[in-house]
Image (spheres, coloured by chain):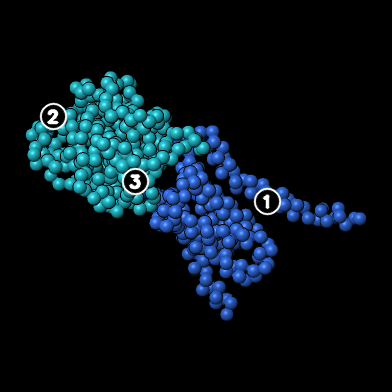
Chain colours: A blue, B cyan
Amino acid sequence: MAATPRKTQANPRAKYRKLLSPVLYLAGLAPAVWSFWLGAHNQLGADPVRSFEHVLGLWAFRFLLASLAITPIRTVLGVNLVRYRRMLGLLAFAYAAMHVATYVALDLRFDFAILYGDLTKRPFLIFGMLAFIALLPLAATSNTRSIRALGRNWQRLHRLVYVALIAASLHFLMAFKTWHMDALVYVGLGGVLLLLRLARAPWRRARRV
Amino acid sequence: AGLRTQPGPFNAPEPQTPRDAVTHYNNFYEFGLEKEDPARLAGQFHARPWTLRIDGAVAKPLTLDIDTLIARHTVESRVYRMRCVEAWSMVIPWDGIPLAQILREAEILSSAKYVAFRSVLRPDEMPGQSMGAGTIDWPYVEGLRLDEAMHPLTLLAVGLYGDILPNQNGAPIRLVVPWKYGFKGIKSITTITLVDTMPPTSWNRLAADEYGFYANVNPEVDHPRWSQTSERVIGSGGFFGERRQPTRLFNGYAEQVAPLYAGMDLHRFY
C-alpha cells in the first residue's frame, strides 16, 4: 500500500517532464496558431495566404535546424538536450505538413493541374516536396516502438534528415528572385551543422577501430 | 494632397484593390526585399523637388520639373489591371499622363527605336540600394520598344486613388505598362533616353532565363520556378476569400496591344 505514494514522490522530475512535454509542443505550435488567427482576422497584410505559407515554411526550417543542432550541442558544449530532439523533429514535420497543406489548399485552391505542373517541371517546388517526403518516414518512425523494432536501421533511416535539409535549403534559396540574406543565413547555419558532422566522422571511425 | 484629374479611357471593370493593399504590398527593392519594406522605409525619401530628363535621339532634350509637368498636362485617372511576375494581381486606379504625350514634346528623331528608363540612385535615402552582392545593380533600368512606349495604354503615373503618388509606389513619377509584368513599371524615374538599340533591363541582367526584355503577361509562358496560368487576386479577402483567377494573354489587353507583336514568337521573346 505504501508503494504507490512512494513511487510518485520518488520521481517528481518525471512527472514534471510529463507535464512539460505537451506545454512545449503547444509553445512550438504557437507561431502557426497565432499566424492563422491573424490571417483569419485579416491582420496578415495584403497577401495573407503568402504570409502564412512563408511563416510555416520558415518555422519548419527553424525546427529542422534545431533538431540537427542537438548532437553538436552535446559534443561541442557538453549539454545534453537529446530528449527534446524527437519533439523538434516532429514540430519540423508538422510545420512542413502545414506549409504543404496551405500551398495546396489556400494558395493553389486545389488546382491539381497547377500542382502537377509544379511538381513535374519546377525544381523549386520539386525540392520543396522532396524535403517534405523525406520527413514523412522519419515522423512515422519517431515513436519508441519503431526505434526498438528497427534497431540499427532506425539510425540509417533517419539519415534521410540530411536529404530533407539539403532539399529544403535549395527550396528556400530558390523561393526568392535574388539572393536573400535571411535565406542565406538559415541555409548557412544548416551547412555548418552538416560540416560539423562531416568533421566528426573520421574521429568516430578511428575510435571504433 | 489631391490631384486634379479627368477620367481617362481603358478602365478595367474589375473591383479595385483596396488602397491600403496597393500602398502596403510593394515590390520596390530599392527599399528592401519584403513587400512591407517600401511602406515602412520610404518615409525618408524626397520625391520633391524632382526633375525628369528626356534626352538621346530627340530634337529637343527636356528637363522637366515634376510639378510643372503635372500642371501642364491633363492628368487622367485610369483603372488598370496589374499582374506581377510572381503570379499575383491587383486592379489600381492610377492617375497619370500618357508617355507618348510627353515624348512628343521632345520631338523624337527617326533614329530612335527604343526607350531607356533610369531610376534614381540615392543609397542614403533608399536602404535597399546599399545591400550587397546578389541583388540588382543600381540604379534600376528598364526599356520599351518605341511603339510600346508610344502606345496609348502606356502611362507615366504621378498619382493613385486621386492622390499624389506615395513614395512606396514610385514617387514622384513611374511607368505603368498594364499588359506587361509589373517589374517593367520602373519607379522614381529620373531619365528617359531615346536610343537606337535594345537597352539593358535590370531583371534581365540579373536572370535572363527568367525575365525577358518584353515581359508581356502570357499564361502560356511559365516562369521557370512557377506557373503563370493563374494568379492570386490581392486584397480579395482574407484567408478563405482570396481568389485565384486565370491569367489572360497580355493581361486582358490583347485587343489593344496584340498587333504590336504580330508574327513574333512570344515563347522566344518572353
User: The N terminus of chain A is located in which quarter?
Assistant: bottom right
Q: Residue at x 53, y 52 (%)?
A: A96
Q: Which mark, residue B105?
A: 2
> Looking at the image, is mark 3 or mark 2 nearer the viewer?
3
Give the residue type that dot 3 points to.
Answer: Pro
Note whether B145 is above or below A75 in the view shown: above
Please report whichever mark, 3 or 2, sits nearer to the chain's N-terminal start: 2
> Looking at the image, is mark 2 or mark 1 nearer the viewer?
2
Q: Is residue B172 visible?
A: no
* Subunit ID for the residue under disc 1: A
User: In the orientation shown, which residue stands out farthest toward the right?
Assistant: A1
- Mark 3: give few (<14), some (14-19) or many (20+) Cα within 10 Å: some
User: What is the x, y in percent for residue B118?
Assistant: 22, 40
Please state the total of marks drawn on the protein image.
3
- Mark 2: give few (<14), some (14-19) or many (20+) Cα within 10 Å: some
Q: Secondary structure at mark 1?
A: helix
User: What is the x, y in percent for residue B233?
Assistant: 41, 37
Q: What distance separates the C-alpha of mark 2 from that of mark 1?
A: 73 Å
Q: Residue at x 68, y 49 (%)?
A: A22
Q: Nearer the viewer, residue B64 or B12?
A: B12
Give the residue type that dot 1 points to.
Answer: Ser
Q: Are marks 1 and 3 on the same chain?
A: no
Q: Residue at x 56, y 58 (%)?
A: A136
* Subunit ID for the residue under disc 2: B
Give the residue type that dot 2 points to.
Answer: Glu
Q: Which mark, residue A21?
A: 1
User: What is the x, y in percent for residue A91?
Assistant: 59, 52
Q: Nearer the viewer, residue B172 or A90?
A: A90
